[in-house]
C-alpha cells in the first residue's frame, strides 16, 4: 500500500490521519495526549497505538509529515512604525505564517513596551517599519532597545532596507534574519518573504526549542505550524493543480475552544460597481484569529458580543439559564455538551462565534461624500462571491446541525454593509483533513487535492433549524 501519515501536534492532543495515496482514502485516525512538557514521543506513540487499534496493522508509510501548534503554538510579537500600515503588515505576515500574535507594537518602543515584550517571551519577533528609503530613525531606535534587552528569541528584520545595516548592528548578540520589507512602498504589501522566513525559523529553531525534534525517528519532518497547514490546504482546495480544478475562492471557519479562526483564499476585489478600495491592501491568502471568541475559554465573551437576547432566541433558552450554563463552562472548559440544553447553547454559541468572526474577517462598504458627489468606499476584502464556506473543527463537526452553524457566516440582509458570502456552497471537513492536505500538498499536491475533494462533504440541504429561524 502507498500510504502517508499526517500528524498534528496540537496543544492538547496529538492527532494522526493515515491515508491511502493510491485510492485517495482515509485509512483511519488516532490521537494521544500532546506530551510536550515531558517527552513528545510518548503522546506520539500513544496516538500510533490508537491508530493501530482502529485499522489493524499499520502500513509502511511513504511519508510521515507533521505540523504543530503544541506548547502554545508559534508565539510572535510584531513591531512596526505606523499601527495601521507597517505594524499591520507585519501582523498579517505573522498570522499568514501560522503564528499566534501575542502583541503588536507601533512607533518608538518605550521602556514599558520593552518590559511587556520581555514578559511575553515570544518565540520570534518580527521587526518592521518604514518604506524602503523612508523613515530610518524609528526602526533603528527600536532595534537598539531590542539589542540591549534580554529578549533571546530570533528577530526577523522586514523593514526599511536602507536602514537594515544600521538596525542589524544595533541587534547585537541576537539571531537576526533579514528579509524583504513587508511594505516596500506606501500601501504596497510584500508579506510573502516574511512569511517564508517565519516558517523557516519555525522549522530550524522552534521545532527544536519546543522538543518536537525528539520525535524525529517517527517522522520525516515538522513542516509548518498547524494554522499554516490549514491555510495551505485551503489554498490547494481553492486553486487546484495543473491536472485538476479546485473549488475556486473559498472561506474556512474553525470555531475552537480558545479562538475562532477564519481563512480566506480570494482576491477580495470590489464586486460593487464603482466601489473604491481604501486602506491597506488585503492578502489573497488571509487568516484572522479571534481570541475573544473561544467556544469554551471565552463563552461569556461570545454571549456579550452577540447579546444575550440573541443567544436566547437562537437556543430557545431563558437568559438566566444561559448565564448559569456559561458559568459552568468557565469552571470546566473541557466538558462537552451532554444535555439537550447544553447542545442547544453550544449550537447558538458556535453560530454566534462564526457570524462575529466572519464579519470581522470580511470587508465593509460605506458611502463617502466628496466634492464631486457620493462614492462607495470598500475597506477590507469583498467575499460576497466566494464559491464555498468550509467548516472544520470539533464545534462544527460534532454538531447535530453543522449547516445551521455555518449559516452564521452568510450575508445578512439586515447588515448590507458587510461583505460576507452570499450564495456559497456549505461544506464540512468532517475528517479534519485540511491540515493533512496542507502537509501532503508539499510532497504530492495531486493526491492531497483529490483526497480533499473526495472527503469534504457538501451540506446541501437546508436544516429544519434554519427553516424555523429564517423561513
Image (cartoon, rainbow, N blue to C red):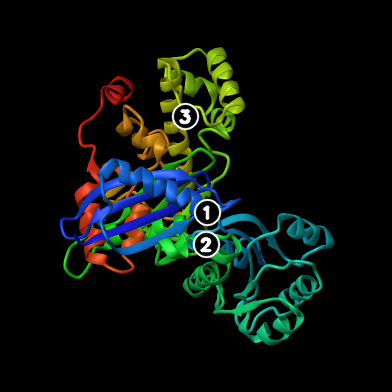
Label 2: element kind: helix
Q: Could one spot residue 260 in this view of the protein?
A: yes
Location of the C terminus (image quadrant): top left
Q: How many marks?
A: 3
Residue carrying label 3 = 349
Label 3: element kind: helix
Foreground pick, 130 / 339:
339
Give how far apart the Cα atoms at labels 3 and 1 are.
Answer: 33 Å
In percent of width and height, residue 289 lies at 52, 49
Residue 401, image quadrant: top left
In percent of width and height, residue 82 lies at 66, 65
Single out the mark in the foreground, 3 or 2: 2
Residue carrying label 2 = 214
Foreground pick, 46 / 313:
46
Label 1: element kind: helix
* Residue drawn at the location 33% of the way across and 50% of the way down: 17
| Mark found first going from the N terminus, 1 or 2 | 1
**Residue 234, placed above or below residue 461:** below
| Mark found first going from the N terminus, 3 or 2 | 2
Give how far apart the Cα atoms at labels 3 and 2 are.
Answer: 39 Å
* Residue drawn at the location 24% of the way across and 37% of the way down: 459
* Residue drawn at the location 43% of the way across and 37% of the way down: 355
Single out the mark in the foreground, 3 or 1: 1
Give how far apart the Cα atoms at labels 1 and 2 are.
Answer: 7 Å
**Left or right: 450 in relation to 132:** left
Location of the N terminus (image quadrant): bottom left
* Callouts 1 and 2 close, C-beta under 8 Å: yes
Residue carrying label 1 = 40
Q: Residues within 10 Å of mark 3 (few under 14, many from 20)?
A: many
Amino acid at each position: 500500500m502507498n500510504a502517508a501519515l499526517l500528524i498534528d501536534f496540537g496543544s492538547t492532543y496529538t492527532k494522526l490521519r493515515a491515508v491511502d495515496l493510491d485510492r485517495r482514502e482515509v485509512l483511519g485516525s488516532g490521537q494521544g495526549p500532546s506530551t510536550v512538557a515531558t517527552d513528545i514521543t510518548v503522546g506520539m506513540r500513544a496516538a500510533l497505538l490508537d491508530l493501530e487499534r482502529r485499522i489493524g496493522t499499520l502500513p509502511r508509510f511513504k511519508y510521515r509529515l507533521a505540523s504543530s501548534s503544541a506548547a502554545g503554538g508559534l508565539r510572535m510579537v510584531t513591531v512596526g512604525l505606523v499601527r495601521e500600515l507597517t505594524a499591520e503588515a507585519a501582523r498579517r505576515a505573522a498570522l499568514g505564517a501560522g503564528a499566534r500574535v501575542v502583541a503588536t507594537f507601533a512607533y518608538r518602543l518605550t521602556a514599558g513596551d520593552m518590559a511587556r515584550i520581555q514578559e511575553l517571551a515570544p518565540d520570534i519577533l518580527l521587526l518592521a517599519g518604514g518604506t524602503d528609503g523612508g523613515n530610518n530613525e524609528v526602526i533603528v531606535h527600536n532595534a537598539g532597545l531590542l539589542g540591549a534587552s534580554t529578549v533571546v528569541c530570533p528577530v526577523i528584520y522586514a523593514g526599511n532596507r536602507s536602514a537594515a545595516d544600521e538596525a542589524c548592528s544595533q541587534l547585537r548578540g541576537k539571531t537576526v534574519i533579514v528579509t524583504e520589507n513587508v511594505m516596500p512602498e506606501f500601501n504596497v504589501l510584500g508579506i510573502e518573504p516574511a512569511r517564508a522566513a517565519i516558517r523557516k525559523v519555525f522549522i530550524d529553531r522552534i521545532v527544536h526549542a519546543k522538543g518536537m525534534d525528539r520525535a524525529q525517528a517517527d517522522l520525516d519532518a515538522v513542516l509548518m505550524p498547524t494554522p499554516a497547514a490549514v491555510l495551505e490546504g485551503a489554498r490547494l482546495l481553492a486553486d487546484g493543480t495543473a491536472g485538476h480544478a479546485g473549488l475556486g475562492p473559498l472561506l474556512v471557519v474553525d470555531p475552537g475552544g480558545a479562538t475562532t479562526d477564519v481563512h480566506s483564499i480570494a482576491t477580495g476585489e470590489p464586486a460593487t460597481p464603482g466601489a473604491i478600495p481604501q486602506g491597506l491592501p488585503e492578502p489573497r491568502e488571509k487568516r484572522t484569529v479571534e481570541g475573544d471568541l473561544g467556544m469554551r475559554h471565552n463563552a461569556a465573551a461570545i454571549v456579550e458580543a452577540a447579546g444575550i437576547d440573541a443567544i436566547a432566541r437562537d437556543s430557545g433558552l431563558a437568559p438566566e439559564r444561559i448565564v448559569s450554563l456559561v458559568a459552568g463552562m468557565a469552571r470546566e472548559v473541557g466538558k462537552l455538551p451532554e444535555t439537550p440544553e447544553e447542545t442547544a447553547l453550544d449550537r447558538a454559541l458556535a453560530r454566534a462565534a462564526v457570524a462575529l468572526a466572519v464579519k470581522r474577517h470580511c470587508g465593509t462598504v460605506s458611502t463617502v461624500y466628496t466634492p464631486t458627489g457620493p462614492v462607495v468606499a470598500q475597506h477590507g476584502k469583498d467575499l460576497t462571491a466566494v464559491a464555498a464556506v468550509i467548516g472544520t473543527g470539533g464545534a462544527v463537526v460534532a454538531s447535530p446541525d453543522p449547516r445551521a452553524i455555518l449559516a452564521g457566516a452568510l450575508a445578512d440582509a439586515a447588515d448590507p454593509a458587510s461583505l460576507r458570502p452570499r450564495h456559497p456552497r456549505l461544506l464540512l471537513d468532517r475528517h479534519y483533513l485540511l491540515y493533512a492536505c496542507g502537509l501532503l500538498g508539499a510532497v504530492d499536491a495531486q493526491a492531497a487535492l483529490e483526497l480533499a475533494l473526495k472527503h469534504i462533504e457538501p451540506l446541501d440541504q437546508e436544516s429544519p433549524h434554519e427553516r424555523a429561524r429564517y423561513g
